């Protein structure tokens, strides 16, 4: 299993290189490490080392150092007093703060999206939500995490608010590993969402309903994470 995971990780780096051949190596490594955090491949409390990531990703030390620096600055990783770098463990206070921040930002993005959305956008979001439902049906935790994030990322893209979107993406990096733990504990079938209500609001152009549905989605998701900490 360890060899398979190592090969999968290196294959992801190769895939990123193929998709962004003109991107510098440190950006490719950053994006791969970001995915590992966002989708819970690195667990809360897990320590990471430069050499370990060099071996796992099959890259040099310099791009790994740069990627770690960026992720520490974003709060996705923590530099401990003993000079260890770890994935943050969320306590109840941190979860509450993240929920408050998400409620302040994400409903506004949904509102803006409802004011700008077109039929093709709704169709694309429905397709993503169908893939998410399929992942839930199969108990595919990684697929669920990827498609759930994709749904929100596509919605935020429609909102055309890059500053708000960057802030939200930073929040997702902080709770991604904990969400993966919850999925592992309770399974994907016990993870409700408000995507259908969001889609209905977008299709009808009801910005207020889109904002309300997004707030409900955030509260449900963060409540699930909180339940996994007890």
Image (cartoon, helix red, strand yellow):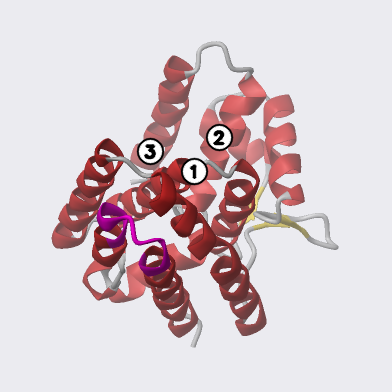
State which quadrant residue 215 falls in: bottom left
Label 1, residues with CA under 10 Å away: few <14, some 14-19, many ≥20: some
Q: Main secondary structure of the magenta part?
A: helix
Where are the magenta residues, as a range?
Answer: 201-209
- Mark sitting earlier along the chain (2/3): 3
Residue 205 place in picture, x, y as percent: 32, 55
Residue at the spot of label 3: 3
Give the residue at mark 1.
35
Of residue 80 and residue 205, the one placed in the foreground of this image is 205
Mark 3 nearby-residue class (10 Å; few <14, some 14–19, many ≥20): few
Q: Position of residue 97 (x, y in %)?
A: 65, 75
Answer whether labels 1 and 2 touch (C-beta < 8 Å): yes
Image height check: is 115 above or below 19? below
| Residues marked 3 and 1 touching at CB (< 8 Å) | no
Residue sticking out furthest to the bottom: 230
Relative horizontal placement of residue 190, taking residue 214 as reference (left or right): left
Query: Tag 1 or tag 3, which sits nearer the N-term?
Result: 3
Pick the front one: 71 or 108: 108
Which residue is depicted at the point 39% across and 77% down? 220
Is 202 covered by the magenta stretch?
yes
For image coordinates 47% across by 75% down, the residue present is: 222
Q: CA separation, marks 2 and 3?
A: 22 Å
| Residue found at the far right of this picture | 81
Residue bearing the label numbered 2:
31
Is residue 134 shown in magenta?
Answer: no
Mark 1 lies on a secondary structure that is helix
Q: Position of residue 90 (x, y in %)?
A: 61, 73
Point out residue 44 in the picture as x, y percentages from the top left corner: 56, 65
């Amino acid at each position: 299993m360890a060899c398979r995971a190592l090969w999968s990780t290196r294959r992801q780096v190769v895939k990123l290189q193929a998709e962004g051949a003109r991107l510098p190596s440190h950006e490719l490594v950053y994006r791969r490490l970001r995915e590992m955090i966002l989708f819970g491949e690195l667990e809360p409390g897990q320590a990471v080392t430069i050499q370990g990531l060099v071996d796992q990703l099959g890259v040099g030390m310099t791009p790994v150092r740069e990627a770690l620096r960026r992720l520490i600055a974003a709060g996705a990783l923590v530099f401990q007093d003993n000079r260890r770098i770890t994935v943050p463990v969320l306590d109840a206070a941190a979860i509450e703060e993240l929920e408050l921040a998400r409620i302040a930002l994400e409903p506004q993005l949904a509102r803006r999206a409802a004011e700008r959305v077109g039929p093709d956008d709704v169709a694309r979001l429905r397709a993503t939500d169908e893939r998410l439902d399929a992942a839930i049906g199969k108990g595919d935790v990684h697929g669920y995490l990827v498609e759930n994030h994709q749904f929100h990322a596509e919605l935020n893209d429609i909102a055309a608010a890059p500053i708000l979107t960057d802030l939200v993406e930073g929040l997702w990096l902080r709770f991604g590993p904990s969400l993966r733990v919850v999925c592992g504990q309770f399974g994907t079938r016990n993870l409700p969402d408000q995507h259908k209500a969001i889609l209905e609001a977008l299709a009808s152009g009801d910005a207020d309903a889109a904002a309300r549905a997004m707030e409900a989605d955030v509260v449900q998701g963060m409540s699930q994470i909180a339940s996994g900490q007890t």
